[in-house]
Amino acid sequence: MRDGRLDPPQGAGPPFRAFAQREIAPFAAASDATGNLAAAAADALRREGFLGAPVSPENGGLGMSAVDYGLLTAEVGRACASARTLLTVHNLVALTLQRWAGAALRRTLLRDLASGRKLAAIALSEPAAGSDIQAIEATAALEGGAYRLRGRKAWTSFGLTADWLLVFAQSDQGSVALMASSDTPGLSRHPITNMSGIRGGAMADLQFDDCLVPRENLVGRPGFGLSHVAATALDHGRYSVAWGAVGLADACLDTAWDYLRGRRQFGERMADLPLAQAALSRMFVDARAARQLCLSAGRLRDERSADALVETLAAKYFSAGVAVRAANANARLRGARGLTASDPAQRLLRDAKVLEVIEGGVELHELLIARQLTSEMVHA
Amino acid sequence: MSPETHVEEVITGFLGQLTPLDFIEPDTNIFEAGIVNSLLALQLINRMEQHFQFEIGEDDLDRENFSSIRNMTQFVLRKVSDRCATAV
């Protein structure tokens, strides 16, 4: 809670919180209302080096551990889900380049991303390919020194404003991942303005009409675009979204607590009413449990453990649900006020719903976790 | 036990943990057999990196390296040999 009385130990959390509450939170309502993340919020992330927070120093980043990057993401997510989305998509592309791009791309493009001089987004989903990423239909045909890219990408967060796009397509050598500059001739970006949540996320549909992308901008090798490059990107995205959900649940606790301690009903502070206390307790324990799962995933990532992938899936799955439950409770506790469009509880609720969909929806997570369980149980 | 047999056993063990299958022939192409999804592909790479203490990067992304237990064994032996050569 904002006054810290019930906060669990958080390592680097408090400095990140001070930053996010000072530099990001004041712009959250405006970013939601206008549909554009306030430039001041993005500038603040850039100025602090957070747009390259988890990228290694040799590639121009801060080299933050996965745990610290998670704590940062939670605090940014607590302040503004749209700013957290920028942190998520930009860093997931940077980390994917760090893992799978060749030395030349890492030396040039990755350094631009790690410094925040250039912004990146991921263009994977298509109108007919969401959870089933193997079904993408965009094509990349190698012609001399460039790939000719054709196709339509849907639901690209920050697709409207990113300088670089990590685009996935099918080629005659299998799937490929390409870094395409946003000023590539043939690329048109179409804003999606009616999103219900994370409205400052500059969501766009992207049309690639014979865009020529230099062969040097290939990330990974042909045939590995989906199985390894996209999978890596989604894993980083899930980890970040999981922490963002923890932050959003914390924001719901903050909002609920502020309201309940200031409002009197039945002759008492609402915060002293048993049913309100029960709701707060559920929110608190839920958020704390989600945080522990995220910390566990973070530690495994820092240890480069092979179990980190599944723990990350579990953390994202659980945390997104926690965020939605907390946002529902927060809105309900505020009575009719919580139903008004301008109330902070409504923004939190709309933003929380998005977390259950992005980087793989609830059901996809259940499927993937169950597959893992099945394998383990067969050999138990 | 030869290094090759040891590595093959370790990789067979990984696949055993990560798939519901009881047995996979060393020469079975795991891509063509539909055994590998993207989660499994990354899990395999992470397990190899963690167990054998090397990093797999862009240069290693050759389908052949990961297509069967036999090929993964040869890949691991090459990587370990490269690491030893670098260390010397």
Image (cartoon, coloured by chain):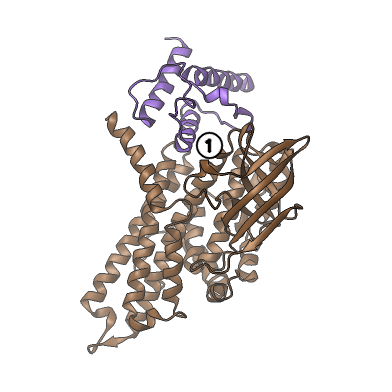
Chain colours: A brown, B purple
Q: Which percent across, then down, holds residue A52? A: 62, 53
Instruction: Determine crowd level at label 1: few under 14, some 14-19, many 20+ residues with C-alpha closer than 10 A.
Output: many
**How many numbered markers are drawn?**
1
Using the image as rendered, state which of residue A141 and residue A291 is in the foreground.
A141
Q: Chain of mark 1?
A: A
Q: Is residue A52 above or below residue A278?
A: above
Residue under circle 1? A227
Q: Give the amino acid type for the residue marked by disc 1 in the picture.
A: Ser
Residue in the image at 38% along x and 31% along y: B18
Q: Position of residue A367 (x, y in %)?
A: 37, 44
A343 relative position to A35: left or right: left
Element at label 1: helix
The residue shown at (56%, 31%) is B55
Residue A105: percent from left, percent from top: 71, 42
Image position of A70 with respect to B61: above or below: below
| Residue at position x 39%, y 42% in the image | A368
Quadrant position of the N terminus of chain A in the picture: bottom left
Residue at the location (41% across, 75% down)?
A: A345
Q: Is residue A270 left or right of residue A207?
A: left
Q: Quadrant of residue A156?
A: bottom right
Asked if residue A5 can be seen in this view, the reply is no
| Left or right, residue A327 beside residue B60 | left
Residue A337 figure quarter:
bottom left
Q: Residue furthest bottom?
A: A267
If the image is split into quadrants, where does the C terminus of chain A sit?
top left
Q: Position of residue A54 (x, y in %)?
A: 57, 50
Tell me if residue A261 can be seen: yes
